[in-house]
Image (cartoon, rainbow, N blue to C red):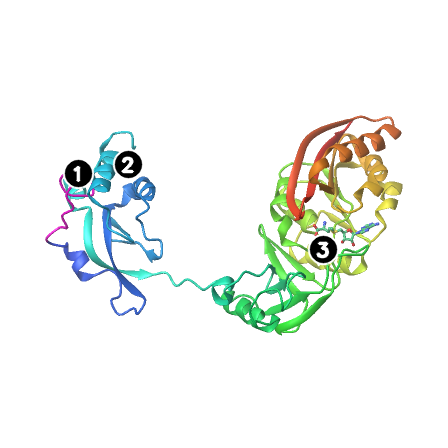
Amino acid sequence: MILSPPGIIKPPKMIDSKMTQNPIPRTDPDSAVRDAFRIFKENGEPIRRVLDEFNIVDYDCKPFADDVYLYLPLHRSPDKEECSAIRDRLTSGILCLPRPIDNAEYFGGYVKNLLFQTHKKAPTVSDLLGFSVAYEIIGDIAVLDDKFTDGESDSEISVFDVADAVLTAHSAVKTVLLSKGPISGEFRTRDLEFIAGADTKRTVHKEYGCKYKVDLGRAYFTPRLSAERHRIMTQIADGDTVIDMFAGVGPYSILIAKSAKPARVIANDKNDAAVELLKENIALNKVQNIIALNEDALFLSQKYAGAGDHIIMNLPHNACDFLETAVTLCKSGGVIHYYAMTSESDLFESSVERIRDAAKKQGRKIEVFEMKNVRSYAPHQYNICLDVRIV
Ligand code: SAM
C-alpha cells in the first residue's frame, strides 16, 4: 500500500473528489490537519495494527471513511526506512488482508494535509492538579481516599480544589465525598464527609448490566470487586443454590440471579440498611429467584444446612469465624468461595489450613481448585479468594 514506490513518500497529486469535498466539517475549531493513510475499509483493522507497530497513528483524531476508503490520521510522517518497512510488512503475504492491496491503495495510500476532527479529551484530575489523587467513583459519587490530606502535595491545593478537579474531569460525577478513615466495624462502613456538589451519600451504581442502589454511609459497597463478582458468577451452574452469607446490597447475588440460572440465591446480611437496599435492588433489577435475609450468618445453618452448591463468604477480615457454618451449609461437592486479607509471606497457606480444619471437624475433605489474588489492599497485604470444593 501506502505508499509510493519503494522508499519514497510521494503524496498523490490529486485528492479524489470525495476528499476534496472533505467529509468532515472544516469549521470545527478542534479540527486538525494531519497526513493520513488511505486504505480500503475492509483492510482497516489489520493495516491499522501494522501501522501501530510503527507508532504513527494519531488516536487523538477521529479516522474518517468514505464509501471505499478509511483514512487513518498520522501524528508524524513515516521516514524513508519506515515506509519501506511498512511496505514490506504489507506486501509480505504473511498479513491476511480481506481485500488484496491494489495499485490504488499502494500508490495512493499516503496522503497529506487532510483535515481531521480531534477527540475532545477531558483533562484528567492529575492534568488539572499537577499531582495524582486516589479516589473511586461509585455511581455519580466520587469518594476521595482517606489518605488524601490537604498537606499531601507540596502545593496550596485544598480538598475543595481537588473536588472541583474531580467534578471537572468527570462530567457524570455530581457529588464528592471525603473518606475520613478506613472501612471498619461489623458492617464494614466508613465515615464520609460531604465536600462538593450535591449533598448525598445515595446513588445508583451500574455494573455488568445490573443497577445497585447504594447508601455509602449506611452499607458497604465497592466497585473494585466487579471483575471478581463476574468470575464467581461464571461458576454457577443451572439449577444451583447459592448462599451469599454476607451479601451487602446484593452485587454478587443479583448478578448471579440475573446472569446465571440458579434455582435460588439466598442473600443474607446482618446490616438492616444493607438488606433494605438489597430488597430495593432485587426489585430494581427485576430478579425473582432471590430470598433476602437479615440475619447473623452464623444462624443460616439452622434452615439451610446442606443446601448450598456455592457458598460466598465475602467478609474478608473475619470470614474465618464463619467457616464451620459455611461447611455446614455446603452440599457434598459444593464450593465455598472464601475471601481473606493476607500478607505477601502467607498469601494462601494459612487460609487453606483453616478451611481444611473446619471441614475436618465435620468429617469432610477439601479440594482447592482456585487460589486468586484478587487485589492489593495495603502495602504487602492482599485480598485473596480461595475456591474450595467441600467433599
Ligand atoms: N458482598 C457484599 C459486596 O460485595 O458488596 C458485601 C461485602 S462486605 C465486605 C461484608 C458484609 O457482611 C457487610 O455488608 C456486613 O454488614 C456483613 N456482615 C458482617 N457481619 C455479618 C454477620 N455476622 N452476618 C451477616 N452479615 C454480616
Write the start and end of the magenta stretch as one range. 1-13
Q: Position of residue 74 (x, y in %)?
A: 28, 52
Quadrant that contains the N terminus: top left
**CB at mark 2 closer than 8 A to ligand 1?**
no
Helix, strand or loop at label 1? It is loop
Q: Amino acid at mark 2?
A: Pro
Sequence-first tag of 3 and 1: 1
Q: Position of residue 59 (x, y in %)?
A: 35, 53
Compare residues 88 and 26 and report the one nearer the observer: 88
Residue holding disc 2: 98
**What is the crowding at mark 2: few (fewer than 14 residues within 10 Å), some, or many (at least 20)?**
few
Using the image, tell me which numbered label, if any, was put on residue 249: 3
Using the image, tell me which numbered label, if any, was put on residue 38: none
Residue holding disc 1: 102
Q: Are marks 3 and 2 in contact (CB under 8 Å)?
A: no
Taking the image as shown, residue 66 lies to the left or right of residue 356, namely left
